[in-house]
Each structure stands twice: as C-alpha cells, then as structure tokens.
Amino acid sequence: MKVTEHIESKNGKTQFSFEILPPLKGRNIQSVFDSIDPLMEFKPPFIDVTYHREEYVYKEMENGLLQKKIVRKRPGTVGICAAIQNKYKVDAIPHVLCGGFTKEDTENFLIDLDFLGIDNVMALRGDAVKSEVYFKPEKDGHCYAEGLVDQVIQLNKGKYLDGETLNQSKTDFCVGVAGYPEKHMEAPSLNSDINYLKRKIEKGASYIVTQLFFDNAKFFEFVAACRKSGITVPIIPGLKPISTKKQLNILPHRFHVDLPEALTKEILKCKDNKAVRQVGVEWCIEQSKELIENETPFLHYYSMGKSDNIKQVASNLF
Ligand code: FAD
C-alpha cells in the first residue's frame, strides 16, 4: 500500500513508522530482525531501509604504494526490503539515490523493486562520497533528487529510457522526498531549499519526510513555509532520541541541526550515557506528544539499528 493510502486510511490519526540501516557487510539478516522485532507491537504500516553508497578506501600494497578501492560497507537494501515484506507483511520503503547510479542503473533498480511488490520509494540525491567535498553525479546520472523523482514518475507512465520498451505493466510507485526544517547544508537559504523541495513535489513526489530535528518550533515553521509556498503533500517529521554525550557534537556536524539550549544543558548535567539516554527518551516523548496534538500523520523514528530507546518512546505514545 502507498504511504498516502496509509495516511488516508487513518483519518488524521498519527501512526508510527521507523527507518533502519542495512547491517555492516558480514553480518546476517538476523541482526536486522532483532532491531525490528521489538517495534512491531506499535504496528508500523511501513519501515524505511536506507541506501549506502560506495566509499573509497586506500589499501597498502606489497610494494608500499596505496591502492584506491571502492567498497560498499552496508549493501543489502533491496534484499532487506524483500525480507521485511515477506516476514512482517508491512510495506518496506527502499531509499533510492542519485549518487553512484546512472539513469539506467536506476531504471533496472526500480524494475527489481516493482517485481518485488514494493509500492513506495524514497528518492534522494545522496551525499558526496566521503573523500570528496562536493556531490558528483555519475556521467549519466541525476544531479538532484528532482531528476530522480521525474524518472520514477516517467516509469509510472510506462516510459522507459530506451523509449521503445513495450510496456505491459506500468509501475505505480508512490514517491517520498527529503525536507529539511533547518535547511539542507548546501542551500543558501531555507527559502531557496523550499523552492527546490516544491519542484520535487511538482515532478510528482507525494510526501515529504524531514531530517531529524530536536526543536518542534523549527518543524512547525518549516511546515508553515512549505504550505505558504504551495506545497500541500503530507509532511512527516523525522525524530531521533539522543543517546550519548558524544552526539551533542556528532549530530550537528553530521545532520546540520541545532540542539536546543535546554536539551544541551540537561545532557551536560548527566553523569553517564545511561542518564543521557533517559533525557533523550523524555525529550523525544515530549516532542512526539506535541506533534501528535498538531495532527501529524506519522511520527517517523530514526532507529539507526538500535530499537530499545525507540521502543521506550513509542510505548508512551502508541
Ligand atoms: P536534493 O533535493 O537534490 O537537494 C540537494 C541540495 O541541492 C539542496 O541544497 C537543494 O536546495 C539543492 N537543489 C535541489 N534541486 C536543485 C536544483 N534543481 N538546482 C540547484 N539546486 C538544487 N542519504 C543516503 O546516502 N542514504 C539514505 O538512505 C538517506 N536517507 C535519507 C532520508 C531522509 C528522510 C533525509 C532527510 C535524508 C536522507 N539522506 C540519505 C541524506 C541525503 O541524501 C542528503 O541530505 C543529500 O545531501 C541531499 O539529498 P536530497 O534528496 O535532499 O537532495
């Protein structure tokens, strides 16, 4: 079922969903199930599975020179989506990236997803590979998520890249895109970012999932600005309970978000990470409650492979 249909089916009642990461190469699927199992009691209609592009690593050869190698540390997005749909009978939503994909790779990827019975995709540009400063698309790839959304929608109309394929069965993907309440790190302003977000919707995306944030006021301002710009699709907030002191520095650096003074102060007072976890859970519960009061269609939690604190949050809400 499409995310938009899940939203319509509940008449404004807030639902629970979450995102997982594929495990590091070499670990088995049980580690994925172990992170999902504790959260199934909250009846998520869908689970997102992130996609992780290639990275460059340098390996020392016998002659002492360094060899540049391409590795993917977290493969398995498609297989995990298939396993989720098969085991839990809920929708799995694979993240699909521009980065590392030619348009033809994308088309073939989407065909695989369609054959697996996947109804939704989250269309994202992806970041630059770790050793590079700026995002570089493949030679025949998309520069921005907007182009990727357009490709999915064209496929939904039965339009394949070769222009000749006889299409007996069109795909029918519902497309989600990313939004940034505190603006995307490369955007010169929030307004500029929202204008490009609007273009993704005009290309055919049906819903928005936001970057994580810790200050609801920023989310509400973002939603108001989106609505003012003419964006009418559902906007799903992304949430993560903070769980270690280190994250005070990691999260702003990695996700370009601010942590509210009150949260930072509480965390700095904590003696250990057990106490930090509790502060993080309580903050996230308060954030979630306020979002539910404001008729948010879904609360989407970034589990990052760890479900215990998300379970603690969800038990208070769903
Ligand atoms: P875009 O929408 O393409 O925007 C990128 C930047 O370009 C923005 O600054 C925007 O303002 C600007 N822009 C957009 N269109 C244009 C245009 N036509 N001309 C000029 N400028 C333009 N990353 C992963 O690698 N794997 C994942 O699974 C993943 N999942 C994510 C899930 C969510 C909910 C979110 C919020 C992010 C996720 N990311 C993931 C991170 C994401 O890939 C990065 O934030 C990336 O840098 C931007 O992706 P985007 O789709 O928002 O890009």
Image (spheres, grey):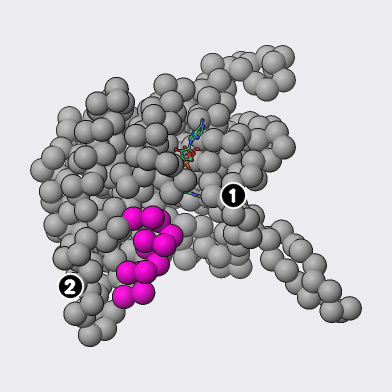
- Residue at x 53% of width, y 25% of height: 150
What is the quadrant of residue 158 in the picture?
top right
The residue singled out by tag 2 in the image is 266
Residue 70 versus residue 228 in the image, above or below: below
The residue singled out by tag 1 in the image is 134
Could you say where residue 110 lies in the image, as x and y percent from the top left? 58, 33
Q: Nearer the viewer, residue 86 or 138?
A: 138
Mark 1 touching mark 2, by CB under 8 A? no
Could you say where residue 113 lies in the image, as x and y percent from the top left? 55, 36
Range drawn in magenta:
245-257
Which amino acid type is marked by label 2?
Glu
Q: Between disc 1 and disc 2, whose residue precedes?
A: 1
Q: Nearer the viewer, residue 266 or 89?
A: 266
Taking 56 as reference, is 318 left or right?
A: left
- Residue at x 13% of width, y 51% of height: 289
Taking 160 as reference, is 304 left or right?
A: left
Judged from the image, the secondary structure of the residue bearing numbered disc 1 is loop
Judged from the image, the secondary structure of the residue bearing numbered disc 2 is helix
Q: Residues within 10 Å of mark 2 (few under 14, many from 20)?
A: some
- Say which of marks 1 and 2 sits in front: 1
Residue furthest to the bottom in view is: 271
